[in-house]
Every structure is written in C-alpha cells, then in structure tokens.
C-alpha cells in the first residue's frame, strides 16, 4: 500500500474504495497510519521558514480521522467479538453513502 500522504492521495483512496479497487479495510488502514504515525506523533514537514505543516489539509485530516474512527465503530457495532476474531476484514464494506460524503467533503 502506498503511504504517500496528501489530500489527493486520500481522495484517490476513497475513490478506489468506492470503485472496488482497494478494500475498505485498506482505506481505513491508510487513515489509521496517517493519524497515528504522522498526525498524533507530530511527524510533519518543516517548511523553509521553519514552521511545520502536516501533509494533509485540516479538512482532509478530519476526513481521515473520521474514516479511522468510523471503521472501528462500524466493526464494533456490526459484528460480535467472536465474528471479529474470525472474519476476513477485507470482505467488510462501509456504507457507500459514507464514502461518497467523505469524498465530497474536501
């Protein structure tokens, strides 16, 4: 999975999930990795003026954070613990309207 972080990459991943080119698990994983590896750990680009800037815009960061959180909530609210221990997460799909909303929100 490509771990390049940009608004365009997030949009492409959401579109790929809508088109069935990647799983919704892969989309959620990309968002999780951004939030944990970059955003929450202050790993960001240092601009030439010395100020830091994150690779995603504020709006895209909100979308990535929402996808990360909603994936976990969707799993917890839709499946029992026993099911989650055996189910192939690659076969789980978030509601299409959620992805469409996220795609159009930034």
Image (cartoon, rainbow, N blue to C red):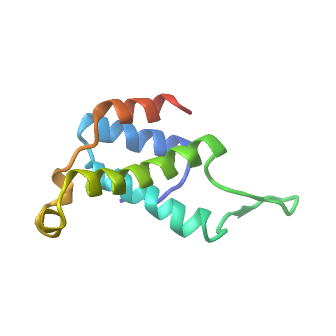
Q: From what the image shows, is residue 88 above or below residue 21?
A: below
Q: From what the image shows, is residue 53 above or below residue 98?
A: below
Q: Which residue lies at the image location 28% right of the left edge and 57% below the top edge?
A: 76
Observer-nearest of 22 and 90: 90
**Residue 2's image quarter?**
bottom left
Which quarter of the rendered picture does the N terminus lie within? bottom left
**Residue 68 at x, y = what percent?**
43, 54
**Residue 48's image quarter?**
bottom right
Q: Which residue lies at the image location 23% right of the left edge and 39% below the top edge?
A: 20
**Residue 24 at x, y = what percent?**
29, 48
Observer-nearest of 59 and 72: 72
Observer-nearest of 61 and 66: 66
**Residue 93 at x, y = what percent?**
23, 44
Which quarter of the rendered picture does the C terminus lie within? top right
Q: From what the image shows, is residue 53 above or below residue 100?
A: below
**Relative to 106, is 46 on the left or the right?**
right
**Relative to 73, is 61 on the left or the right?**
right
């Amino acid at each position: 999975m490509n771990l390049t972080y940009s608004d365009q990459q997030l949009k492409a991943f959401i579109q790929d999930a809508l088109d069935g080119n990647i799983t919704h698990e892969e989309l959620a994983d990309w968002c999780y990795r951004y939030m944990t590896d970059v955003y929450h750990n202050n790993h960001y680009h240092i601009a030439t003026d010395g100020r830091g800037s994150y690779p995603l815009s504020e709006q895209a960061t909100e979308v990535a954070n929402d996808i990360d959180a909603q994936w976990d909530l969707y799993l917890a609210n839709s499946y029992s613990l026993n099911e989650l221990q055996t189910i192939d997460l690659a076969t789980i799909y978030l509601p299409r309207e959620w992805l469409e909303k996220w795609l159009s929100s930034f």
